[in-house]
Image (tube, rainbow, N blue to C red):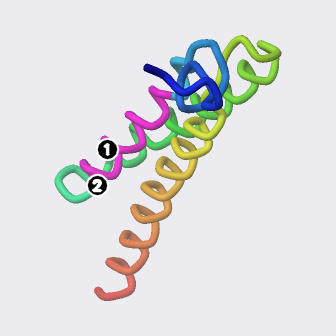
Amino acid sequence: MTDPSLPSGDPGGSDGQVNRKAVWSVVCGTVAFATLYVFPFGALVLGFPAITSGIHARREIIDSKGEQHGDTVGVIGIMIGAGAIVTFLVSGALDLLSQ
């Protein structure tokens, strides 16, 4: 039996779907970070789509006026993608300085 004082629906508190681009932003960013140590160029190949899809997702969520949610997911994807790119650039710069 459910407690009537608890909100119904998903844990996010809003009824609607999570924006797919926001989810893809997190997926691309996570894979970019994972491939950073195996194939460093993968951070650039997947980091930029993580950032751009996160930005587009946030715009679509705002324009949907409550029909979609996942703004936090989009922000997380942007941060992971940007972190992978920055890590790639810093490690490349340190590699050049150490030679």
Q: Which residues are magenta?
A: 23-35
**Pick the front one: 11 or 49:** 11
- The residue singled out by tag 2 in the image is 36
Give the total number of marks visible in the rendering. Answer: 2
Q: Amino acid at mark 1?
A: Gly
Residue 34 x %, y %: 26, 50
Residue at the left extreme?
38
In the drawing, what numbered circle is on residue 86? none
Q: Is residue 78 left or right of residue 26?
A: right
56 vs 87, nearest the viewer: 56
Q: Position of residue 50 (x, y in %)?
A: 50, 36
Taking the magenta stretch, the answer to whether it contains residue 28 is yes
Split into 4 quadrants, where in the image is the C terminus?
A: bottom left
* Percent of width and height locating residue 68: 66, 16
Residue placed most toward the observer, 49 or 95: 49
Residue kind at label 2, given as amino acid type: Leu
The quarter of the image holding the N terminus is top left
- The earlier-in-sequence mark between 1 and 2 is 2
Estimate the x, y position of residue 45 in percent, counting from the top left: 39, 38
Proximity of marks 1 and 2: CB atoms separated by less than 8 Å: yes
